[in-house]
Image (cartoon, rainbow, N blue to C red):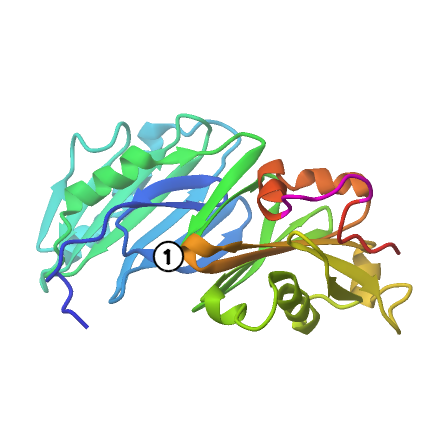
Amino acid sequence: MTKPGQDPPPAARTFAWDGVSFLVPGGWHLAGYSFGKNLTRVQLEDDYALRLEAEWTRPRRPPDLRKVESRFSRASKRLVRAAKRTDRLDGVLPAGSAFLYTMPDETRLITAFLSASESTLSCFLRIHFQPDDREKPRAVLGLIATGFQAHVGATVPWSLYDISIELPADFRLVSTSLQAGRKLLVFQWRLRRFYIWHFSLANILLRDRTLEEWAAEFLNSFKGIRGPTFVPGANGTVLARRRWPYVVGHFEEIGRWCFRYQANCVHDAKRNRVILWAYNYRRPEDVDKIPASLRAETASGRTSGKPAGTAEA
């Protein structure tokens, strides 16, 4: 591996998560996350170290920036004592405070507080720099602050790694599996479940079978969905059928009272990947929650009538 700092940082990319988006250097990727009551935390790393810690809240009222700055200053006292140098970064943020701490070992840390003009959302950042990093702390903070946005519309973006999707704002992320070559995000809305995968190396996955055959085989092997049997459809659709002993429904489906399925897939040849999604829902009108753009992307050529890929209870 090339020693950190020997090559210029990759171009900036958008990171979007739980209603917030901002720009980061291209080599920074999600490393961890957690959700609390009105609190979201994420960690981003590059190939070598932790680079960004961000947490945001959505208070009912706009924050009092003077009070926030006072608490921010008190919380920073331990860093001030540990650092050999402390610099206030003025002129970088439109509002709020930012400080750069240089430690005795020449590592550096930025702490900053951002507020979103679109909402009452507020975000606290900790940005880490190694001694030989080529990125400039002020420039990185400016990059994040310039692209920082809170999304308050009916849909919100999710952008990480090679994933870029837009989903309803009330879809809540419940789990992830972010493996090399296979990334899964699982969302829930009123007990309905929405699964979306991004698979790399499509040329290998589809070498000896059609897209729909591969998708049906994968869904049948996926332990997170129990109850239906999936069979290949046409034009990217995968059909769901009931199988014994789950003619009535699997206990997990019964617990959420969701017995219908719709599944679609697309081969993105340009990026050599497969995108697959499956929706476990309750009523026919629930399908309208899936954005039309996503349905159109993965279901081109669908005929009218009963939605393809639907299993009746």
Where is residue 12, by image quadrant? top left
Observer-nearest residue: 293 or 82? Answer: 293
The percent position of residue 276, horizontal first and vertical second, equals 59, 57
Range shown magenta: 299-306
Observer-nearest residue: 136 or 73? Answer: 136
> What's the residue type where badge 1 is placed?
Gln
Observer-nearest residue: 195 or 230? Answer: 230
Q: Residue at x 85, y 70 (%)?
A: 243
Main SS, magenta region, reads loop
| Disc 1: CA contacts within 10 A as few (<14), some (14-19) or many (>=20) | some
The percent position of residue 38, horizontal first and vertical second, equals 53, 44
The percent position of residue 67, horizontal first and vertical second, equals 34, 32
Say left or right for 255 vs 57. right
> Which quarter of the rendering shows the C terminus?
bottom right
Q: Residue at x 15, y 69 (%)?
A: 2
Residue at which label 1 appears: 43
